Image (cartoon, grey):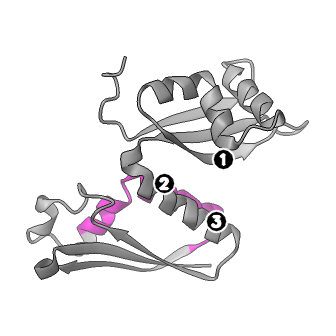
Amino acid sequence: MRNVFPDAPYMRGYWTNNHYQKDNYETFRESINNGASFEQAAFATHTGKVAKSLGFNGVYLKEEFPHSRSIQGLVEVLFYRDSVKKDVELIHSVKYRMEMQEPAIDLIINRDMHPDLFGPAHMKGVNSELIALDFWKTIVGNELYKLLEKYNYEINRQEFHSLENLNEHHITLGLVR
C-alpha cells in the first residue's frame, strides 16, 4: 500500500456526519470531546491512521462545521508530508492573518518552497505572468485562492522576481480587504 502514493505531498480527508461513511467524523468529534488536540483527533480516524502509515506526518484543518440542527457536521483536512510543511505553514499563517482582518498582507513564495514551479523550464525566457499563473495551480495557490474568497480579500499586486546571479527567485503577492 505504501507505493500507492509514493510522491503525493497531500492526502485529503472530508468527513461528514451523514449516513455515508460517518465513522471518521464521529471518531474525530469524540476525540475532540475527550480532550484530544486537533492533530491527535485527525490521526485517530481511520483515514488518519492510513495517512500516517503512508508517511503523512502532519495535518491541516481546512474547514470545520460542528453538527447543529440546521447544519450537517463537516470536517475537511489535508494530511501532508514533511516535505511540504513550509507550504502548510504559509497557508495557516495567511488564514490566521485573514481571520484577524489585517487590512493588507504581503506574501513571498520562495523557490525552496516550490522547486517545480521555479524549475529550469520556467527560468529560460518564460515571462513572469506564466510563472504566476502556474502558482495558482499548486495546492498552496489553490488554498490561498479559497481563503481570498472566504475572507473577501483581493490581490492588488502579483510580481515575479528573479535574481539569476544569486539564484534567487520568488513570487510576491499583495492582498487587501
Q: Are discs 3 and 2 less than 8 Å apart at CB?
A: no
Residue receiving disc 3: 96
Q: Which mark is residue 88?
A: 2
Q: Earlier in the sequence, mark 3 or mark 1?
A: 1
Q: Main secondary structure of the magenta part?
A: helix
Q: Is residue 13 above or below residue 38?
A: above
Foreground pick, 40 / 142? 40
Q: Is residue 116 above or below residue 69?
A: below
Measuring from the top left, give residue 16's x and y in whole percent: 70, 30
Indicate yes or no whether the magenta region holds residue 94. no
Q: Is residue 52 above or below residue 145?
A: above
Measuring from the top left, give residue 46's x and y in whole percent: 60, 21
Magenta-colored span: 130-153
Give the distance between the C-alpha atoms of the residues marked 1 and 2, in whole angstroms.
14 Å
Q: Is residue 74 above or below residue 60?
A: above
Q: Earlier in the sequence, mark 3 or mark 2?
A: 2
Q: Identity of the amino acid at label 3?
A: Tyr
Indicate left or right for 154 with 82 as reference.
right
